[in-house]
Amino acid sequence: MTLSRTIAGCGRITDRAATSPSTGSFPAELEAVLSSTMTAAAQREITTWPGYEPTPLRSLNHLAEGLQLAEVLYKDESPRFGLGSFKALGGSYAVVCLMADLLEAQKGERPPLAALRSGALARAVENITVVTATDGNHGRSVAWGAQMVGCACRIYIHAEVSKGRQEAMEALGAEVVRIDGDYDASLRRCAEEAAANGWYVVSDTSYEGYMDLPRNVMAGYSVMAAEVLDQIEGPPPSHVFIQAGVGGVAAAVCATFWQRLGAARPRFVIVEPATAACILASARAGRPATVPIEAETIMAGLSCGEASLLAWDILSRGAQDFLAIEEQGVESMMRLLASGEAGGGTIEAGESAVPGLVALVAACRDQDLRRSLGLDDTSRVLVFGCEGATDPAIYQQILAGNDA
């Protein structure tokens, strides 16, 4: 797949919405949602973990030139802790924090997180079970966190999650339960069985009565955004195109940029599959919305029909544009990045890594949309390549030009 062919046929935006975000500094009321204290604590902790390295920030200089933009930067999460996605930052951190909370409640003294994640307190937590529902990457992170601390882990996946992603979670010691139905059905089953058995749900989405652990998950994700701000040379980006499932990662990145940059933060553009655009629907409704998942998207990690309440609190004030994209263009963009023709070297990008780029290319090809998004030859655009080849078999099929 050549650069010119990808730009010419990368797909299209099927729906869009726009809002008027808050200006100025990070609002005090959002500190109660995801505080700068929480994000700073997560950043201090995770950057001390064995194997931690900032993931690369790549310049897609050839793509930027082809789109007549000043710069396109790609945050490449494929090498993150060997788990292949940014999710390694969230679920695992939440598990460690949960174990610290439980042992503090039991013993009256909070153990050091370093002692927990080293496995030194495994005997104290071995009878605790953490559970989650996942499309793959979040479950892998929770399973890794459980393996580190020594507690049990049970993961619920829906009918369309690939066998390869299931096996990756099982390799980390998790018990994996596959159910009929979609992601939201697996969430309900997970919550029901956790309540019946005294297990602890570690979810990356928040809902009424369940807020604390998703805050820790989002705080973990903030590490990725903090790295970008340290890696960028020169002024901050003018635009951030970032994908959303339930909205957690988009909200974490938006909050971190807002906390650090205040009124100078970039314009945030939220990108979703047309078949699962719950954040766009929320923007249109002015409140958290649910959409039915009638067909699964190739962008497996984004197949979510219900917005996270915490994420929506941030995105409703911090994001300005909401785009839905069709499936066409995902595979060709993956092949383009793998070829190196976009710039930045050869990049391993999974199906959920490229929606921001697909939307950016489609927006630049639509002159009216390009103008309304404020994209021009001075724009410096940041996108997040949130995963690598999290299912190697599917990835190789796509690179070979075969249906996944």
Image (cartoon, rainbow, N blue to C red):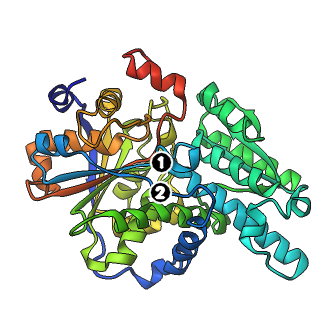
Q: Which residue is mark 2?
A: 249
Instruction: Give the residue at x 78% y 41%.
Output: 173
> Quadrant location of the N terminus?
top left
User: Relative to residue 106, is residue 164 drawn left or right?
Assistant: left
Q: Secondary structure at mark 2?
A: helix
Instruction: Give the residue at x 24% y 40%.
Output: 343
Which label number is shown at residue 318?
A: none
Instruction: Give the residue at x 90% y 64%.
Output: 124
Discs 2, 1 touching: Cβ within 8 Å: yes
Q: Which residue is mark 1?
A: 245
Instruction: Give the residue at x 24% y 59%.
Output: 239
Report the amino acid beneath label 2. Val
Quadrant for residue 112, please give it. Answer: bottom right
Q: On screen, 329 above or below 209?
A: above
> Do we see residue 204 in this rendering?
yes
Residue 84 in the image: state x and y as whole percent: 53, 42
Q: Nearer the viewer, residue 117 or 204?
A: 117
